[in-house]
């Protein structure tokens, strides 16, 4: 970017007015008063153009592109006060230079926000968010955001476009990889944890940054799982199933919200007043600012909402404060104001919210608060962070099958390690790792050799391309080669792989998707392992050697053949920087898997959308056997192949009967549901004990199960523990047809178990007042 050539001038030139007025930004009761008087004073000096400039978010040429358009003439615009923030600028030095420009060249010297897609770690890349969610380890997830914030702020950033909390019940949608799966309760816990992790207790500290919850709203419910597609949804479904994680982030004090690309009941989120003002601000009390998604304002012309000026006014009027990339606010709001299409107050309100964010971040005190060369060299990709990445990955893997305890592997003998993904760095970081350098990732083969030790001989063969389809590979390889099509023919590769398999004691085949087969703009209609790798697996199976699958993917896949034919399946998603070491740790039994699925794995794409917290219907099928005139398919069972909450361990756990402290629940009281969980296997291990509730009779139809609590517990071999959950009236509440949040008297069932399918059951009566 050209800004780099800008002459560097000392920071002390920041206008004294700002420095004095900003004063101390911590601690006292008058913090809000001080902020208000500071912002009032600043705004009284701003021209209309400068106010509109604050609403403009740009991405300079040459920074990481996540859309098709990048901004031009950024340097000049900053100097003219036409820019509120930048994103996609990576590295504290570049950020310092851009900030220098803002605080020396622009008339009022207002510092810029610097945002980025810090999604699963910053430069040190953690497992993709869907993987992290499978840990069900809320403190760990919070820690992942805390570490990412520490690293990103050391490198100049003060704003993360995360957490992404879109509920997704459709694994065809590639962005399912970026969220926490299908459940609103778990999604809400994770949303809060992420916001806490990023923002800490003090936004103005130099190691915290402002979070941005996205994509508001319902982006994960795109029809047919096709990216950017239409969303049409009842209010009851929205409030009960899709909105809770966004609301949780707002309740946790998230500083900003990103509007989603999709329409909601025919109105684009970016120009949706009901969504951005009535719901977000008036009902939920959100005080921060709302930013559009990438060219979201401009895209409303394609949604058919009018010309550029009209859609820009529509967005502002709806409650959007900042325009990412489109420059619709910058280029049309003045005209719209003259024509009476927007009001001065709306522009002022939006500008004020952005200035408040900058104030809270401490930028008026020190615009270079987040640019510190020493901190950057200490924090970025530090050994400690890599250790954390390894631990997070181990805790995110899900063991789907382990027949006859083929896992853990012995640290002796010969292992045939097969698959393009077994000797690969470029895919290990997963989607949305815009700042991560995959060259520094650990491939599986290195991990297997490191951890296996001297008595293990690891023989490697690629066996198959991730896909043989060159046209498909081209679509995936937009950010560099992820699918590398070998010069050898598929048969030659298979022959080599079968050859080494025959000389080995066990096969470990690392198969699945390339990293860019999920994420933005990566919808798939067939969610299987690509045919080239399936063919390889069939040939490996014929060797008769035990077949262990390590599956990498950014979404649930259909794994019927794999489940029938593999001896063991470890689902690792994309594990980030330490993938290879983490996989080897788990395969060799240094850590017993403890992850549990946060999305259902279908048997067929025809079952989608598939999710556990469904309604019963008037003709429930009651099991998987087809019954005529019941809600079922002729050609596939109703159940998923692997249910929500499912995941095995190297040890086993048994559950006793549920004991309720009372069979009646009265208002303002609680009852306790207790169950004894025993580690009945041969290893120590962790188990996620899950609590579900069913409201048997309601004023609207209620789901067959809803997650209402969980505890991740560590039990030593042979240990038993009583696990207790308190159930209060709050856990029974839902939004009724008038959108009141109520608990209705009647019978409730309680389920506790190792996943949502395999549960113990009890029931109680809620008596109401
Ligand atoms: C994505 C957002 C992201 C933004 C900025 C968009 O394409 O939808 O999630 O934060 O780009 O990179």
Image (cartoon, rainbow, N blue to C red):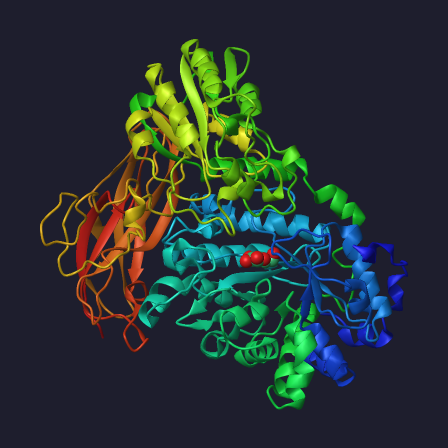
- Name the side, left or right, on which 124 lies relative to 128: right
Give the number of callouts. 0
Q: Nearer the viewer, residue 89 or 336?
A: 336
Residue 203 visible from this viewpoint: yes
Residue most extreme to the top: 503
- Name the side, left or right, on which 763 lies relative to 199: left
Residue 403 figure quarter: top left
Relative to 64, is 480 above or below? Answer: above
Q: Residue at x 38, y 40 (%)?
A: 557
Instruction: Tell me the quarter of the image containing the C terminus.
Output: bottom left
Residue 663 visible from this viewpoint: no
User: Percent x, y for residue 566?
Assistant: 33, 25
Q: Residue at x 48, y 79 (%)?
A: 282
Q: Residue at x 50, y 13 (%)?
A: 456
Task: Give the image quadrant in which the ligand numbered 1 is located.
Answer: bottom right
Residue 767 figure quarter: bottom left
User: Percent x, y for residue 492?
Assistant: 48, 17
Residue most extreme to the left: 628
User: Percent x, y for residue 766?
Assistant: 20, 66
Relative to 175, is 49 above or below? Answer: below
Instruction: Tell me the quarter of the image containing the N terminus.
Output: bottom right
Q: Residue at x 39, y 63 (%)?
A: 242
């Amino acid at each position: 970017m050209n800004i780099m050539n800008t002459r560097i001038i000392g920071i002390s030139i920041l206008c004294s007015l700002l420095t004095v007025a900003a004063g101390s930004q911590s601690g006292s009761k008058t913090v809000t008063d001080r902020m208000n008087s500071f912002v009032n004073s600043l705004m009284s000096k701003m021209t209309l153009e400068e106010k509109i400039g604050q609403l403009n978010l740009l991405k300079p040429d040459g920074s990481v592109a996540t859309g098709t358009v990048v901004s031009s003439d950024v340097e000049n615009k900053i100097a003219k006060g036409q820019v509120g923030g930048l994103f996609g600028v990576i590295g504290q030095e570049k950020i310092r230079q851009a900030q220098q420009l803002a605080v020396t060249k622009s008339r009022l010297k207002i510092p810029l926000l610097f945002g980025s897609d810090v999604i699963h770690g910053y430069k040190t890349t953690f497992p993709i968010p869907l993987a992290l969610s499978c840990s069900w380890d809320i403190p760990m997830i919070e820690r992942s955001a805390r570490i990412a914030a520490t690293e990103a702020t050391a490198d100049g950033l003060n704003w993360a476009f995360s957490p992404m909390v879109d509920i997704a019940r459709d694994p065809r949608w590639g962005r399912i990889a970026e969220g926490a799966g299908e459940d609103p309760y778990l999604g809400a816990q994770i949303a809060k944890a992420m916001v806490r992790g990023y923002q800490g207790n003090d936004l103005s500290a130099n190691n915290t940054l402002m979070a941005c919850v996205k994509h508001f709203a319902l982006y994960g419910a795109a029809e047919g799982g096709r990216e950017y597609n239409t969303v049409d949804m009842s209010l009851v479904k929205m409030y009960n199933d899709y909105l809770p994680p966004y609301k949780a982030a707002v309740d946790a004090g998230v500083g900003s919200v990103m509007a989603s690309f999709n329409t909601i009941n025919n109105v684009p989120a970016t120009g949706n007043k009901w969504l951005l003002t009535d719901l977000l601000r008036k009902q939920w009390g959100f005080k921060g600012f709302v930013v559009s998604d990438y060219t979201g304002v401009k895209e409303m012309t394609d949604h058919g909402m009018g010309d550029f000026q009209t859609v820009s006014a529509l967005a502002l009027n709806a409650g959007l404060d900042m325009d990412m990339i489109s420059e619709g606010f910058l280029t049309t709001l003045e005209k719209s104001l003259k024509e009476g299409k927007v009001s001065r107050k709306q522009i002022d309100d939006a500008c004020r919210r952005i200035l408040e964010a900058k104030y809270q971040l401490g930028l008026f005190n020190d615009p270079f608060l987040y640019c510190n060369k020493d901190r950057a060299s200490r924090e970025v990709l530090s050994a400690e962070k890599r250790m954390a990445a390894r631990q997070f990955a181990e805790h995110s893997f899900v063991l789907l099958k382990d027949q006859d305890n083929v896992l853990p592997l012995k640290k002796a003998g010969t292992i045939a390690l097969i698959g393009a993904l077994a000797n690969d760095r470029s895919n290990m970081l997963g989607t949305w790792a815009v700042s991560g350098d995959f060259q520094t990732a650990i491939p599986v083969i290195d991990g297997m050799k490191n951890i296996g030790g001297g008595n293990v001989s690891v023989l490697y063969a690629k066996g198959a391309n991730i896909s043989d389809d060159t046209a498909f590979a081209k679509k995936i390889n937009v950010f560099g080669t992820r699918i590398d099509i070998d010069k050898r023919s598929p048969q030659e590769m298979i022959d080599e792989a079968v050859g080494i398999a025959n000389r080995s004691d066990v096969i470990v085949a690392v198969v699945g998707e390339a990293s860019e087969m999920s994420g933005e703009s990566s919808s798939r209609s067939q969610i299987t392992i690509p045919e080239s790798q399936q063919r390889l697996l069939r040939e490996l199976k014929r060797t008769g050697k035990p077949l262990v699958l390590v599956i990498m993917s950014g979404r649930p896949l259909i794994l019927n053949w794999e489940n029938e034919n593999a001896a063991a399946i470890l689902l690792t998603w994309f594990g980030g920087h330490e993938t290879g070491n983490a996989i080897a740790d788990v395969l060799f039994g240094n850590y017993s898997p403890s992850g549990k699925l946060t999305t259902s794995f279908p048997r067929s794409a025809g079952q989608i959308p598939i999710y556990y917290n469904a309604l019963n219907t008037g003709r429930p099928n009651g099991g998987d056997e087809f019954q005529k005139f019941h809600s079922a398919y002729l050609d596939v069972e109703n159940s998923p192949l692997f249910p929500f909450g499912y995941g095995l361990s190297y040890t086993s756990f048994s559950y006793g009967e549920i004991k309720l402290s009372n069979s009646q629940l009265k208002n303002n009281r609680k009852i306790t549901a207790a169950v004894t969980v025993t580690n009945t296997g041969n290893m120590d291990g962790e188990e996620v004990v899950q609590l579900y509730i069913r409201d048997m009779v309601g004023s609207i139809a209620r789901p067959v199960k809803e997650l209402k609590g969980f505890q991740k517990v560590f039990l030593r071999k042979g240990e038993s523990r009583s696990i207790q959950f308190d159930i209060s009236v709050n856990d029974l509440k839902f939004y009724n047809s008038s959108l009141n949040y109520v608990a209705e008297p009647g019978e409730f069932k309680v389920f506790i178990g190792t996943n949502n399918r395999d549960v113990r059951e009890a029931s109680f009566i809620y008596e109401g007042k």
